Image: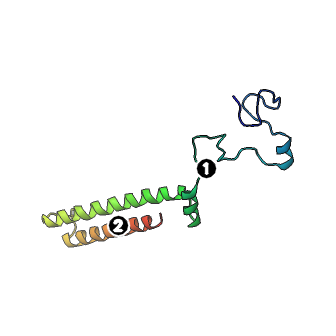
Amino acid sequence: MPVGPSDNKNNKKTTGKIPVPGPSEARTGKRAFTQGSPVRRPCVSASTGWALATAEKGRTVMESGPAIFAGMVFGLFGGGLLVWTAARVRHHEPVAQGVSPVASATFATIAAVIALAVGTWCFSRV
């Protein structure tokens, strides 16, 4: 199977499927095929406009994944803690065993709000 346009049955420079640089490639130092070459990858678009848009902001696409994950973790934890604290206080049940109800509810609410703020900050970094 030919690898590129310069590779045909009469080309003695290739062995197997690994192309050997031709004389023009040796002179210029450039490879015949780039990452976006339609010959090399016929089903893959060469357009990377969305990646360039995020790179202009100083971030790459790979860096947004951890920020999204951390934002979800903090957001779910903070929201869950806030709902759980509100339910415990509403039913007049202790939020923490052996601690003043006011102090434990206050501490849990502050922790939940801080977790929600950190989650929001993580999402603002995407």
Residue 50: x %, y % from top left:
54, 58
Which of 35 and 78 lies nearest the eye of the viewer? 35
Q: Residue furthest left?
A: 91
**Comparing labels 1 and 2, the label whose residue is closer to the camera:** 1
**Residue at 38 percent of width and 57 percent of height:** 73
Question: Which residue type carries mark 1?
Answer: Ala
**Residue at 48 percent of width and 57 percent of height:** 66
Res 77 quadrant in image: bottom left
Res 92 quadrant in image: bottom left
Question: Which residue type carries mark 2?
Answer: Leu
Instruction: For mark 1, give the secondary structure.
Output: loop
Q: Is residue 44 left or right of residue 122?
A: right
Q: CA distance from mark 1 to mark 2?
A: 39 Å
Can you identify the residue that label 1 sits on? Answer: 46
Residue 80: x %, y % from top left:
28, 60
Above or below, 5 against 64 in this view is above
**Residue at 66 percent of width and 47 percent of height:** 35
Above or below, 24 against 104 in this view is above
Residue 99: x %, y % from top left:
22, 67
Can you identify the residue that label 2 sits on? Answer: 116
Above or below, 112 against 25 in this view is below
**Residue at 58 percent of width and 66 percent of height:** 56
First along the sequence among labels 1 and 2: 1
Q: Is residue 121 left or right of residue 13?
A: left
